[in-house]
Image (spheres, rainbow, N blue to C red):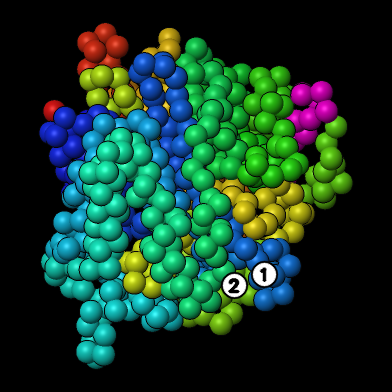
Amino acid sequence: MAITGKPLGATAGAMMFQKGGNAVDAAAAMLAATCTMWDTLHCGGETQALIYHPKLRKVIGINALGVAPTGATAEFYRSKGYDHPPEFGPLAALTPGTPGGLMVMLAEYGTLSLQEVLGPAIQLADGFPIEAQLANTIERQKSWIKQWKTAPGIMLPHAGSGGREAPEPGEVFVQQDLAATFRKLVATEQAARKAGKSRKAAIMAAYDRFYTGDIAQELVRGMREEGGLFTMADLANWRVKIEEPLCTTYKGIEVCKLQQWQQGPAMLQALNILENAEVKAMGYNSPQYVHLVYQAMNLAFADRDFYYGDPAFPPEEPMKGLLSKEYATARFASIDRLRNDAAAKPGDPYPYQGGTNPFAGLLATWDNRNFLPKDTTRRSGQQDRPTRPDTSFEAQRREAFHGGTTSIEAADSAGWVVSITPSGGWVPAVIAGRTGIGLSQRGQSFVTRPEDGPFNVIEPGKRPRVTLTPTMALKDGEPYLSFAVQGGDTQDQNLLQFFLNVVEFGMTVQQAAEAPNINSYQMRNSFGVHETQPGLMEIGTSMPESTRAALRAMGYRLRPMERTSGPINAIWFDRKHRTMWGGSSNHGEDYGIAW
């Protein structure tokens, strides 16, 4: 089974199965293809993955998130008037992670060659008929794209025409530089194979060319020409991390996420909190259920905002305490069952792991209520850049919460299961020189002051705390659910409700992927100006008026939306019949192929 954000991307995955590849091969092919199609990501972004290894009977984490480059200090950004790194442009860029993540996954756990896996992406880079969604996004963002040197020549083929400058829907969109970069990687692999190297060593020879060879040199040259910071040493020193995931149990089901450099543990915390309640007895999307889910998310995301960060940098995040059942019980007991708590703040998990909070002073002054800087333009780093055309600030906030990235799910009969949430390098992205590589904008998820999150202050070599969060659930040690979703701060909100839809309310994965969710804006936005809007709740337009009235009485401000679940992709493993059920929501263009 192969599922991702674009039909052509899913087809690339299915092609790998036809070649005899496994789910890792299929996932890598889908990753390369969707990057090439700019499915709200490109090849210079970041890749986060969970892989179930059937022989080891364990879940493995892949951390292919780039790092802040040399010179990217808090003092540097504040000296330029930024309270956070900017949303777009060269100063938002991290070192590219997705190429390394793809090649390491393929080398370690795949079976096919890089040539085979990149084959569909090379064909797409040579030219594919661009769909309306991407074409129109490029047109809307052209004022940004024109700020940079290389991007206009690729993204705006009709520049200077006096009319539309982006490709027209259906026009063949060509990325010659990107195709050439892919072919260089394949050529390096093939030369290594001819020299007698193993499949794995040959793929890693291509990896080395990307991060230390001529491709790296052009990446750095092109990026620094645009005003970016990263160096050859930054690329050479970066490594993909293969790591242990963090897991909890919910009613006997083990749920796994990547570590606290991304927001996934917040879902684990919310599940721990909700395990103290009779969730099913409340009824699906009843006022009591919606209120409790919102409050559990308030508490878990407040902890995310304060405590999560790159575990490779001190101080150590208190994850043992945060994920303890005892801490969750205490957090559950603090919930007001009748009103929204607009002042919900991080808790203190240190006593639950036998320690003392080193940031008690910062915790005491933390306040999320209407956290919105007065000078939003300057805080977001847009004071000398064009605004997003035809979008209000409110629309930009919704876009940051919901938009972005894609998701990839793959599984095979041998038991391999892959869940990926890649992102970064979305339109408008800086393209680094003649590489064709669109670079990440993920630096904006850092903060520059400890009072805004002491574990997530930007430093060279550090990974920001990101929103990207694939999920794997096991039952009796075997895969039960694999799922992920597009979006930003909504990701673990939608995934939490999707999981409860299946486990508590008995929905199929397709029903659960389409079911209306609620979304909170009470946490600090991970993008732009990092604002909060306590009590704001997005709800599906199908929510009855009686439920809406009850929620308003609890202190919520409601924003009805036609679709609120996000583009969820998922696989459920039917243990009785030894088959798979795939789900792909009706929210976007996501698509799955099974055989």
Residue behind mark 1: 77
- Labels 2, 1: front one: 1
Q: Residue at x 76, y 54 (%)?
A: 450
Residue at the far front in the pictured view:
195
- Residue 321 is covered by the magenta coloring: no
Main SS, magenta residues: loop
Mark number for residue 492?
none
Asked if residue 483 can be seen in this view, the reply is: no
Q: Is residue 331 above or below residue 213?
A: above
Contact, CB < 8 Å: mark 2 with mark 1?
yes
* 362 left or right of 402 in image: right
Q: Residue at x 18, y 50 (%)?
A: 120
Q: Which residues are magenta?
A: 341-355
Image-quadrant location for residue 359? top right
* 104 left or right of 17 in image: right
Image-quadrant location for residue 102? top left
Q: Helix or strand or loop: what does disc 1 sit on?
A: helix
Q: Residue at x 60, y 23 (%)?
A: 272
**Neighbours of disc 1 within 10 Å: few (<14), some (14-19), many (20+):** many
Residue sitting nearer the eye, 219 or 1:
219
Asked if residue 123 can be seen in this view, the reply is: yes
Residue 402, x across and y down, in percent: 43, 52
Residue behind mark 2: 381
Residue 510, x across and y down, in percent: 27, 31
Q: Is residue 97 above or below residue 38?
A: above
Q: Residue at x 54, y 18 (%)?
A: 249
- Residue 351 is covered by the magenta coloring: yes
Residue 559, x across and y down, in percent: 47, 52
Residue 118, x across and y down, in percent: 24, 49
Quarter of the image that includes the N terminus:
top left
